[in-house]
Image (cartoon, helix red, strand yellow):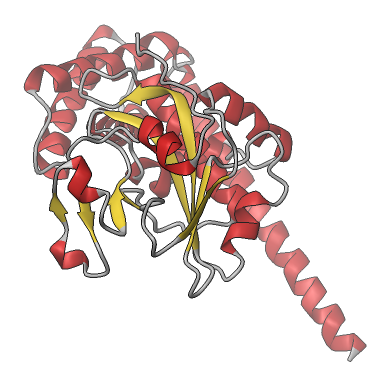
Amino acid sequence: MTEKIAQPTLELPRAFEAWYLPQRPLCCDADYSLLRRRSRAEALKHTHIETNPSALVNMLVVDIDAAEGRAMALWEHQGMMPNLVMENPANGHAHAAWVLAAPVCRTDMARLKPLKLARSVTEGLRRSCDGDTGYAGLLMKNPLSGAWSSEITAPDAYALDQLRAALEEHGDMPPASWKRTKRARTQGLGRNCTLFDEARTDAYRYVRKLPDRTPESGEMLREHVRATCHQLNAALFADPLPAREVEDIARSIHKWITTRSRMWRDGAVACEATFIAMQSARRLKRTKKFNEKFERYAQEVLEK
């Protein structure tokens, strides 16, 4: 079990020293081509530093590219105020950082559930600030650098569930459907999380092609998932996961589909009928939305 980090309450340098975990972080100044990994003491002299160590996530950072960046990070954030805000005094753009009391492991042996929750909470925090969707979170503005106007805006670190509850109360937590989007799949906090999401999405499509739910079809699904996981592992990562980790992910996907998924339990005919009904409902929803938009446009034209 991960030990909780200390809860700092003193001035910025001492608080950040307790919060910041990387020992040899990536760092640079304005020229990103000079990005290098340096000792902690050297890195903290630069304007941009690596947000988290490779094995853990304890800072969730949002990039706000707006002139009112600080205000957007603080406005209507009761119960989920960022711990740190680093503002660029030249244009008002800011980084807002939330510190986790219990860091989330993201090594190859990490549990998927906390990783997925951390990813969803990060997306919720981004939505709460209207943050940049393209920000990957690798580098953050160094709050100890004189280039930024930095401050502590909340002294106590958060539990992930605490942030999730606050985001849900404010209506900023992404819906369950967001987990199926391309952005959710490419925002993985670990290789195993990314591989799991990519492979299971492919497996769902493959299940629809199977003629029945016999043991023979189950074995076909097993082999397909194994092959897909190994192919994706080689294609997605410059440093692929170990073969044993890939096998574990494939086994988990196959077991969930064949023991818990309605796609398998209800049978091939019901699965296809459900898929057709869902597609029909989506078409009707899109048509209704288009008609409503057209009617509003027509009404505006008539009123002119």
The quadrant of the image that shows the C terminus is: bottom right
Residue at the location (57% across, 39% down)?
Answer: 278
Identify whether 3 is placed above or below 144. Answer: above
* 167 or 74: nearer the viewer: 74
Q: Who is closer to the viewer here, 135 or 141?
A: 141
Residue beneath the point at 33% across and 43% down: 51
Q: Nearer the viewer, residue 211 or 288?
A: 288
Residue extending farthest bottom: 304
Residue 190, x across and y down, in percent: 27, 33
Q: Quadrant of residue 148?
A: bottom left
> Hey, which quadrant is residue 133 in on the image?
bottom left
Question: Residue at horizontal 56%, vertical 22%?
Answer: 161
Q: Is residue 80 above or below residue 92?
A: above
Residue visible at 21% across and 44% down?
Answer: 41
The mark tally for this picture is 0
Image x and y of residue 144, in percent = 38, 51
Please state the horizontal and vertical placement of residue 295, each as a whole percent of the image.
80, 72
Query: Does residue 15 appear to the left or right of 177 in the view shown?
Result: left
Residue 256 appears anywhere in the view: yes
Q: Is residue 158 left or right of residue 182?
A: right
Q: Is residue 185 above or below residue 190?
A: below
Image quadrant of residue 116? Answer: top left
Percent x, y of residue 60: 44, 40
| Residue 248 vertical position relative to residue 297 in the rendered view, above or below | above
* Residue 64 in view (yes/no): no
Q: Quadrant of the N terminus?
A: top left
